[in-house]
Amino acid sequence: MRIFHVARTLALVSCHLAVAYLAVGCDPYRSVNPFYRPEDVIFDAGVLGSWKDTDPSEHGTLIVGAHTPDSYVFVLTEPDKDTKQEFVWTLDTHLFKFQEETYVDLFPIAFRVKARTEKIQLDAKDLEFFVPAHIAMRLHYDNKNLVFSWTEQDGLTSLFKKEDDASKQRRLAWERKREAMLTTPTELLQKEVLGARPEGRTTSEVEMHFVRKN
């Protein structure tokens, strides 16, 4: 019975991630290595607490707690009004500095689906079916606001219009770079990804804005 639940929930994870990426048009770089070095890490108690998404259509919430003396645990809850379910991500999180910017490194450690009739949870050992990956976002914050931002790369346009040869070559080069970044060492990862604007691609900035609940 547990195998059935795990398999079904893994399918839900895949679908949820795909829908989430398509909804915002983002496709962030992912890596099996962290985006931070130990000396880059900072800890600020001002990030702790309960937060809510400012987008009235989302109703998402974020609870930030201390995990270790230099890390946080983020619990991100995203309700789905159509299916009456809640998707809950638990993320091991580090704040760090790179070139005067503050970033968060997010690493999934659990995933839970809360529905009317049942609760399904995957822990880190169940997430082994996927390749766990770090994702980095810029972070701007004060006592009342948390703003996560990243550079969106317009990788979906080729689905809707014919590519010329030059555009296709740029896209393939970008895809090869993304594959290489998956196992790139942290120092090179910072140089190639953080703060770097992709060449030959249209980009825009995407934000998620949370305000403090209490």
Image (cartoon, rainbow, N blue to C red):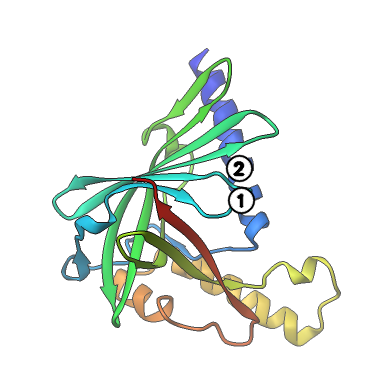
The kind of residue tagged 1 is Ala
Number of residue marks: 2
Residue 84 appears left or right of 197: right
Residue located beneath label 1 in the image: 20
Is residue 33 or residue 99 the one in the foreground?
A: 99
Q: Name the side, left or right, on which 2 lies relative to 49.
A: right
Tell me where residue 40 appears, x and y as whole percent: 21, 70
For the point 55% across and 44% down, which residue is it?
Answer: 59
Query: Residue sitting at 66 percent across and 35 percent down?
Result: 81
Q: Give the camera-side residue of 48 and 89.
A: 48
Above-or-below relation of 162 to 207: below
Residue 184 at x, y = what percent?
38, 69
Q: Residue furthest left?
A: 69
| Residue designated by label 2 | 16
What residue is at 50 percent from the left and 60 percent from the top? 208
| Residue 100 vertical position relative to residue 29 in the rendered view, above or below | below
Q: What secondary structure is marked by label 1?
A: helix
60 to the left or right of 175:
left
Q: Are marks 2 and 1 in contact (CB under 8 Å)?
A: yes
Residue 8: percent from left, percent from top: 59, 26
Crowding at mark 2 (Cα within 10 Å: few <14, some 14-19, many 20+): few
